[in-house]
Image (tube, rainbow, N blue to C red):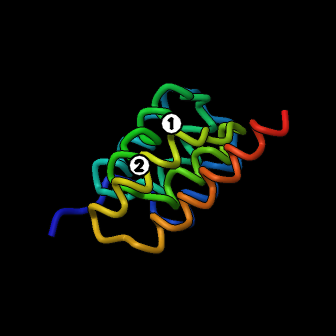
């Protein structure tokens, strides 16, 4: 088995606590992404203020029906997805057999639609 290029958990914590150049933070994030460790990468993308990369990952989450990823990135960006995004995620989640994720996404879509109606 090949040795991981991504930092181990203790090194990860130290890196997140210290100042990092954005390019270095992105490089660390990409090492996690290369290993399929998306959630480990998110904090480094946020630290690098790599908003475009976070949005691209969020779009991937929508197309794969990954409710948890979309929610986490929305939290990091401070931007709640709109009803159309939640509905698209729900459709993708249903297609992937993730019924609970689909149901929660539909609930979130309805809540966002209700917010818009009250505004």
The extreme left residue here reads 1
Viewer-proximal residue, 72 or 62?
Answer: 62
> In the structure shown, which secondary structural element does the residue marked by tag 2 occupy?
helix
Image quarter (top left, top right, bottom left or bottom right) of the C terminus: top right
Q: Which residue is mark 1?
A: 54
**Residue 45, image quadrant:** top right
Viewer-proximal residue, 21 or 46?
Answer: 46
Q: Is residue 64 left or right of residue 109?
A: left
Crowd band around label 2 with a 10 angstrom C-alpha radius: few (<14), some (14–19), many (20+) = many
Give residue 23's mark: none
Question: Residue 7, percent across and down?
Answer: 44, 56
Mark nearer the N terminus (2 vs 1): 1
The extreme bottom residue here reads 100
**Residue 112, image quadrant:** top right
Height in image: 95 above or below 41?
below
Q: Nearer the viewer, mark 2 or mark 1?
A: 2
Q: Is residue 97 left or right of residue 71?
A: left
> In the structure shown, which secondary structural element does the residue marked by tag 1 occupy?
helix
Q: Which residue is mark 2?
A: 61
Q: Is residue 117 left or right of residue 109?
A: right
Question: Residue 117, percent across and down?
Answer: 77, 38
């Amino acid at each position: 088995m090949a040795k991981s290029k991504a930092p181990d958990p203790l090194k990860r914590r130290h890196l997140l606590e210290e100042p990092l150049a954005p390019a270095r933070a992105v490089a660390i994030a990409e090492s996690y992404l290369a290993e399929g460790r998306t959630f480990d990468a998110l904090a480094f993308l946020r630290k690098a203020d790599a908003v475009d990369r976070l949005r691209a990952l969020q779009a991937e989450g929508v197309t794969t029906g990954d409710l948890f990823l979309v929610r986490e990135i929305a939290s990091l960006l401070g931007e709640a997805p709109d009803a159309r995004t939640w509905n698209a995620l729900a459709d993708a989640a249903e297609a992937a057999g993730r019924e609970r994720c689909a149901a929660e996404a539909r609930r979130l879509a309805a809540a966002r639609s209700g917010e818009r109606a009250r505004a």
